[in-house]
Amino acid sequence: MTMKKIVVAGGGTLGSQIAYQTAFSGFDVTLYDINDGAISAAKSRMATWDQAYAHEVHATPEQIQATNARLTYETDLGVAVTDADLVIEAIPEVVDIKNKFYSQLAKVAPTKTIFATNTSTLLPSQFAAITQRPEKFLALHFANHIWANNTAEIMGHPTTDPVVYDTVVDFAHAIGMITIELHKEQSGYVLNSLLIPWVDAALILWVKGIADVETIDKTWMLAGGSPIGPFGILDEVGLRTAYNIMLAASQQPGKEDLVTVVQKLKVDMLDQNKLGQESGQGFYHYPDPAFRQPEFLTNSVTSV
């Protein structure tokens, strides 16, 4: 199957990046979101990606202009998916919201359309039946800063058609991704199976008052040789996404420590509109966070 028209559902931080990278790679892309306000916010993010691609990818003005010419925006789902070959869902990490979306999508999408979820931690088998085309449904997960962290994790479920799986692998290659192909379902794929326990540990240290945010990040960056710590990563991912993932995890047996983390994230961060990079403030202030400053790692590391 040749992919021509791609629809990305959800114009948040990662959804807008997926749409931009796909259009930059030569595909016609429709970005769908629920209302005009969401579309306006997505367009503002696209302007940010214009700058990022110019500075980091060295895209020419002509390439950026052509990318934007291949992007269209739509608030009517039926109109958005007309003649779509692939729909990539990048909406909030909430089961009820995804169920409602796939129920609506199944009614309006062409028979040929492949559905892919960008879910960070949920399993495609949780939604396969409601898509009404389980054989054409799988997970396709991207990392934030898609143009630099160009991985695509591809994960089917037991009844995903192997031809569909291979078609999505080919598509991921076509938009410049290095594919990470999973042999069976795993919550969190490879990346988040490694990342989430690390981030959870940092948040628990913070909530318990063991050390402050900068101390925790400095410790990891100094000892691990990493350019960024867990709280810098959380700001990149977006604190709404992190909150939704941890809210679901906190309801599982053995995850009682996360209940307090979820509460503190909501009160101290989300309720104060500290959403991470997208709002200009999260655990750090943007666009010039403290951990990017030359002196960050030379100051003493102290525990609270």
Image: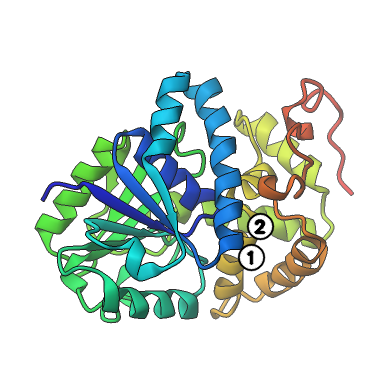
* x 71%, y 55%: residue: 275
Q: Amino acid at mark 2?
A: Leu
Element at label 1: helix
Report the colour scheme.
Answer: rainbow
- Residue 83 spot, x, y in % from top left: 22, 59
**Circle 1 residue:** 243
Give residue 239's mark.
2
Q: Residue at x 51, y 55 (%)?
A: 11
Image position of 144 with respect to 121: above or below: above
Image point 21% across, 63% down: which residue?
A: 113
43 vs 158, nearest the viewer: 43
Please state the horizontal and vertical placement of residue 117, each as a whole percent of the image.
Answer: 36, 62
Residue 101, image x, y percentages: 41, 75
Return the x and y of residue 10 as percentages of the image width and height. 47, 59
Q: Place residue 280 in its image quadrant.
A: top right
Question: Which residue is at the front of the view, 149 or 44?
Answer: 44
- In this view, 234 is above or below 25: below
Q: CA distance from mark 1 to mark 2?
A: 6 Å
Residue toward you, 190 or 97? 97
